[in-house]
Image (tube, rainbow, N blue to C red):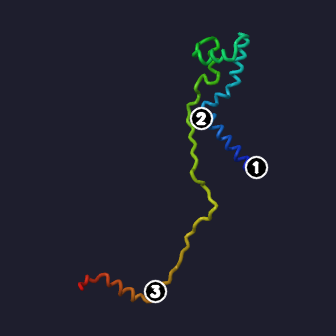
Amino acid sequence: MYLSFVKRFLTIFCFATIVIAGTELHQLLKLPVFIQHFHEHQQEDKNISLIRFIIIHYFSGNPKDSDYNRDMQLPFKTTDCSSLVTLAAPSHPSFTNERPVFFIEKYYPTLKNNTLLSIHFSDIWQPPRIS
């Protein structure tokens, strides 16, 4: 049970790390800056709505106004992801429960009378016979 939980946790953790580091989803970590900047605009103009704030900051280009540096800290205003993460996993497990194969040496008895064999070997060197 505990091992299953650890495997699941490590899988989710590795996946989240790869997705956050290798994509632009890490921009979502900048949401507190978005909220703070929205409140800053609300202090300046009490009638600004969230939609108007989004239009000003995301659909009006990047005008160099007094809070330009703060605007560039908002999520999805800049592209920070310039790396590529490649994950390679083996197609088969690298371990097995099978016992290793050992070669077993076998000894075969030899013939005691080698003269019979030598007679047959000499037949190879005879010229062909015409019948």
Name the residue rendered at 70%, 47% in the picture. Answer: 7
Give SS at disc 3: loop
* Mark drawn on residue 105: none
- Identify which amino acid the numbered label 3 is placed on: Leu
Up/down of 36 relative to 4, above or below: above
Dot 1: few (<14), some (14–19), or many (≥20) neighbours within 10 Å?
few
Residue sticking out furthest to the right: 1
* Mark drawn on residue 111: 3
Determine which residue is flagged by label 2: 22
Name the residue rendered at 26%, 82% in the picture. Answer: 128
Name the residue rendered at 60%, 30% in the picture. Answer: 24
- Identify which amino acid the numbered label 1 is placed on: Tyr
Up/down of 6 relative to 45, above or below: below
Residue 96 appears in which quarter of the rendering?
bottom right
Q: How many marks?
A: 3
Residue 31 in the figure: left or right of residue 90: right
Up/down of 18 relative to 6, above or below: above
Percent from the top left, x then y, of residue 123?
32, 84
Q: Rounded to the nearest whole Å, what is the CA distance between mark 3 and mark 1? A: 65 Å
Determine which residue is flagged by label 1: 2
Name the residue rendered at 62%, 20% in the picture. Answer: 72
- Identify which amino acid the numbered label 2 is placed on: Gly
Camera-side residue of 61 and 18: 61
Q: Earlier in the sequence, mark 3 or mark 2?
A: 2
Q: Earlier in the sequence, mark 1 or mark 2?
A: 1
Q: Earlier in the sequence, mark 3 or mark 1?
A: 1
Percent from the top left, x then y, of residue 50?
69, 17
Give SS at disc 1: helix
Residue 67 appears in which quarter of the rendering?
top right
